[in-house]
Image (cartoon, rainbow, N blue to C red):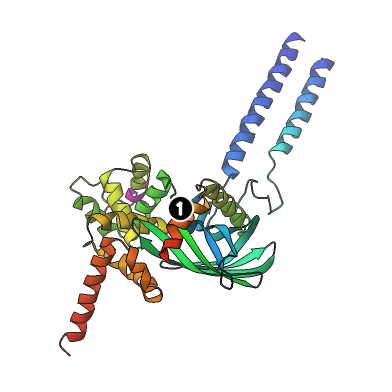
Amino acid sequence: MKKLLTLAVALIAVLAIGASVMAQQVGAQNQARTMIKMLGAFGNGLAISEDDPMDFELIRVGIAAVKVESAEDEKTVKVGVLHFADEKYRLKDVVIGNGSVTANIYLDETQVGSISLDSYPKEDKELWAGTMTLDGKTYNVYLIQGKRVVKAEEKAEKAFEYCRNNPERCKAAMQAVGSNVICDPVTDGNCRERIRTFCEGNPEDSRCKALRLAECGLNLEDAQCRAEIRGVCSNNATENACQRLGEVYNNMVQKRPEILENAPQWFHTVRERLQQESEGQQGGPQ
Amino acid sequence: MKLAIALLLVALVFTVYISGCVQEPTSPDTGPTGPTTGALTEAQAEQQALQTLDQEMEALEEMSLEELENELLQQG
């Protein structure tokens, strides 16, 4: 009898502990992981009425492509938020282009306006300018791109993406910084995963940085990538990625030439080179 | 003996109760902070993405109007 009692009590204890552990595991598995994949406009600014310059509001805009992963699925969705006065709006139909963003503005499920912004460099920062219509009023919008701490897993993801899509260039990029390769992405099918793991633990490793920059050079629609490339260009404007970034910002110069007044030196250097190339092509053999 | 059977029955009821706690939710819309199971619906993915973006925006530094004026209005 006593043994049976002990057995029953032990059974209850085991079941309780087992169920508790199971509940924790299921909870962990079901929790979706999210990661900022691409950043559009993201910062504080002003919206000034087109009709009355004294009618303005502080605004805060956030636009991003976010990767959402569950145990069985993965999706990347573009979302946005606008804080205008005391109201919070959702941005839908988000388009993140090369240095530009557009979206429709919603309050609850009703469309109440739209926003369109272009980015341009000012000293070491990036600014956004454009227009917004909200509740029938048109505003000129100016934003300062905010600083965001890029997480190690996001940095590693860029290295992973580059090596997945360009194994040979991935290997060359690692060799170019004068160190041993982390692994050989050309011959080793598991290499890109190993690169992701390594770079997550060592985001400032020169090879990881080189891979990240290489990926960023191909993804200039991402404001975080433009920020990385701007850092490179301020030291060496002859990098190929600087030329591509210069072309992105040149679109804004065509709309608003006055932004050149406060543009960084590297951008002027790149523009001169672009102009020389353009003149060379026009004057070349027919 | 009867006590042991009673205890076993209690254990059984307890197990059924706990397994109910860890049962996967059947509703696809688990809300902005809810867990997700299986394939993500568009709505679930959007909710999760918005939650992440909101957290990022909370970390954005507040700027005063004066700072904004210095940065922006000098652009003319």
Q: Secondary structure at mark 1?
A: loop
Q: Is residue A186 visible?
A: no
Between A270 and A144, the one lying in front of the other is A144
Q: Chain of mark 1?
A: A
- As for residue A106 lying within the magenta part, the answer is no
* Amino acid of disc 1: Gly
Residue A171 figure quarter: bottom left
Looking at the figure, which quarter contains the C terminus of chain B?
A: bottom left
Residue A251 image offset from top left, x and y in percent: 37, 73
Return the residue found at the far bottom: A286
Vertical arrangement, residue B45 with respect to residue A109, above or below: above
Horizontal arrangement in the rendering, residue B4 relative to residue B52 (left or right) = right
Please rate how many residues cluster around mark 1, counting C-alpha atoms within 10 Å: few if below 14, some from 14 to 19, many from 20: many
Please tell me which residue is depicted at 26% across the width and 47% down the height of the picture: A207
Return the residue found at the far front: A54
Between A160 and A260, the one lying in front of the other is A260
- As for residue A192 lying within the magenta part, the answer is yes
Please tell me which residue is depicted at 79% across the width and 17% down the height of the picture: B4
Residue A28 figure quarter: top right
Vertical arrangement, residue A50 with respect to residue A185, above or below: below
Residue B15 image offset from top left, x and y in percent: 73, 31
Q: Which stretch appears magenta?
A: A186-193
Helix, strand or loop for the magenta stretch, by majority:
loop
| Number of numbered discs overlaid on the protein picture | 1
Between A285 and A246, the one lying in front of the other is A246
> What residue is disc 1 on?
A146
